[in-house]
Image (cartoon, rainbow, N blue to C red):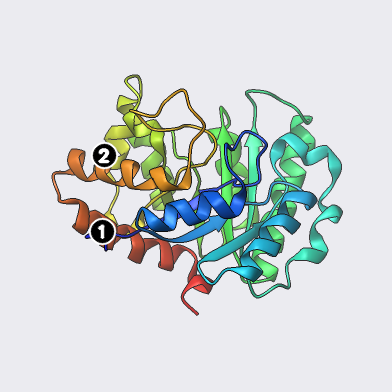
Amino acid sequence: MHDTTWIDSHCHVFDKRMEHSADDALNAAREAGVRSFVVIGTDRETSLQAIDIASRRDDTWATVGLHPHDAHIGVDTIEDLMSSSRVVAVGECGLDFHYDNSPRDVQRDVFARQIALAKAHDLTLVIHTREAWDDTFDVLDAEGMPPQTVIHCFTGGPDEARKCLDRGAFLSFSGVVTFKNAQPTRDAALMCPSDRLIIETDAPYLAPVPHRGRPNEPAYVAVVGRAIADMRGVNAESLSESSTRATLLAFPRMAS
């Protein structure tokens, strides 16, 4: 028994960087007090893998998305995957101007089309944005943000947080909040209302301190949660309860 239980709202358990199989990683996290998982699709293959494991586990849900790195592949490669009852969101999708693995105009178009898919299928939208805040807000404002929108792995500061919150978004915080150079993101986590604050691992990426340098695991979502609880001056049980409620608001299909 665990005094606290958590939801990992964003993990890539099929990634080749994971140390364990998807089932083994999720089972280990379950034993560590993680009650539910959202496994993220970033292209057709990973979206199908996410749907498959979610269909075999009552504690696991899937998203279908095309990452901005792969925007050049085309949204038509994933459009037929939205109908599964285990799919709770479209994404991760958005803009990444750090790597520019797809042309920026293509990224914007594919992001806009996935916003439309989320609205058409009444699904949550999961956004990846890196070095592209202004363009991200421009596309969202032009297309109209879905009622449930999550800014995954939020790494901005209070100004970006306020712009997201003013538009109705949920902020999802990762192990980045434990990094020494991430004070602006910690400041954002401090000012984020509890009913809009959710947590994730982004496993196998961004393992929190003291696990930094190793592949991340869904089990480490508790480390993220406790770090945020400490900085907000609340106990871990309170943060686990509020973040769980917020996650179910952000992904209402998980609660249905």
Other-residue count near label 1 (Cα within 10 Å), few / some / many at <14 / 14–19 / ≥20: some
Amino acid type, mark 1: Thr
Identify the residue at image location x=31%, y=38%: 188
- The image position of residue 234, as x and y in percent, is 15, 49
- The image position of residue 86, as x and y in percent, is 63, 70
* Earlier sequence position, callout 2 versus callout 1: 1
Q: Is residue 206 left or right of residue 232?
A: right
Q: Secondary structure at mark 2?
A: helix
Query: Mark 2 near mark 1, Cβ–Cβ under 8 Å?
Result: no
Q: Residue furthest bottom?
A: 256
Along the viewing direction, whichever of 81 and 24 lies nearer the viewer: 24
Separation of marks 2 and 1 at Cα, in angstroms: 14 Å
Q: Secondary structure at mark 1?
A: loop
Along the viewing direction, whichever of 104 and 76 lies nearer the viewer: 76
Looking at the rendered structure, which numbered label has been put on residue 4?
1
Identify the residue at image location x=35%, y=19%: 181
Identify the residue position indicated by label 2 in the image.
227
Looking at the rendered structure, which numbered label has been put on residue 97?
none
Do we see residue 168 in this rendering? no
Q: Is residue 166 left or right of residue 45?
A: left
Amino acid type, mark 2: Ala
Please state which of the two labelled residues, at mark 2 or mark 1, is closer to the viewer: 1
Other-residue count near label 2 (Cα within 10 Å), few / some / many at <14 / 14–19 / ≥20: many
Identify the residue at image location x=77%, y=64%: 81
Along the viewing direction, whichever of 156 and 32 lies nearer the viewer: 32
Q: Is residue 233 left or right of residue 98?
A: left
Do we see residue 61 in this rendering? yes
Q: Is residue 211 left or right of residue 56?
A: left
- The image position of residue 24, as x and y in percent, is 55, 51
